[in-house]
Amino acid sequence: MSRQQKIQDAFANQIEYCRSNGAPITGRIVEAIIGALDEGSELGRRVLQWEGNPLADALPLRVAGGFHALHLAGQHERLSAIYQGDQIAAENAEQIIAETIFTDESHLLPWLESPPQTNEAGRSSSYIAGLLWLTEQGLPPQYELLEIGSSAGLNLMIDRYAYDLGGVTFGPQKAPLSFSPDWQGPPPPNQFFAFQSLRGCDIAPVDLTNPAQARRLTAYIWPEHTVRFERMKSAIEMVNSQSPHLEGASADDWMMAQLSQPQEAGVTRVLVHSIVWQYIPKAGRDRITRAMEEAGAKATRDRPLAWLSLEANRETYRHELIVRHWPEHGEPIKLGEAHAHGAWVKWLDQSKT
């Protein structure tokens, strides 16, 4: 497949992904971007000559983040009209995008330099549901949670949020943020567990105490998902009050270091991640998988190991909650599906699988 075809396919995939996940405006923006880009601009040349894997590098979202940041700055009336759902603006989106590239290319180019940060606290609901299930399997209900691709560490504050998961409640009563996703299927197990520790890493951690970085993370929120802006505001306040334990490191190097550390008896060590696996180079993914399986082979009932992930299936455009745990069951088990930003969870009845 030619480079040009890979780039076109990456944009087509992102457009369909947006439309399938309740973001038609963002889908239209992405569609207009690829329609407006040409070799006549530096932005066009860099995108159309992209040397990496445009899908794995989330190239469409890198560019879209820059346009959304310009909209949020409130200085582009015609561009903002697209985001505000104006039908005429949507019909003329390619022209408006081309005009914006001409006037603001210097502000758009830096967005190509790094992958998007799509941190979302609402994904913690899926983590909690998975940990409730693991607890029901008899794993020690003290969790050493290790998250890769933590971005700003919003899900490392999982113990500070409150949850209502199909009628099963969890977390502090007076939490700054609470989540009650539309629950489909049977409720998760009604269990109790605690966190022994919460730590995470990211190749480029976002410091939400830095206003510029906070604005950047906000720009990656799809405009259709208005509730996320309020969540982000609350999360920023929480980080400024007490920062999560977040380190700068590649996912594979960091996990090697964590797995090499002694594990306390009576504590379940669990790797978690959400919407990040595609951004990790294949060599890194393979390295993590081998290390987890090797560590799993050494796991005991008193020192078990688990792996919980919420990642996109690029064929179905659904996000699947998958768990593996050792020593008893090392094979992947699909617990359910979930909205990328926590709006709903479809829980599977494990008695029928």
Image: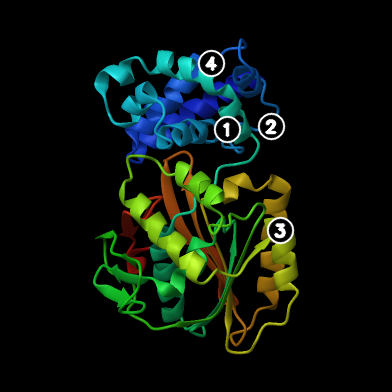
* Residue receiving disc 3: 249
Mark before the other along the chain sequence, 1 or 2: 2
Mark 3 → mark 4, Cα distance in angstroms:
37 Å
User: Which residue bears the numbered disc 1?
Assistant: 59
Q: Residue 53: x percent and y percent?
A: 65, 33
Which quadrant would residue 25 be assigned to in this image? Answer: top left
All told, the count of numbered labels is 4
Foreground tag (2 vs 4): 4
Q: Amino acid at mark 1?
A: Leu
Quick one: SS at disc 1? helix
Contact check, label 1 and label 2, Cβ < 8 Å: yes
Alpha carbons under labels 3 and 2: distance apart: 21 Å
Disc 1 crowd rating (10 Å Cα; few below 14, some 14-19, many 20+) is many
Q: Which residue is mark 4?
A: 102
Residue 220 visible in image: no
Q: Secondary structure at mark 3?
A: loop
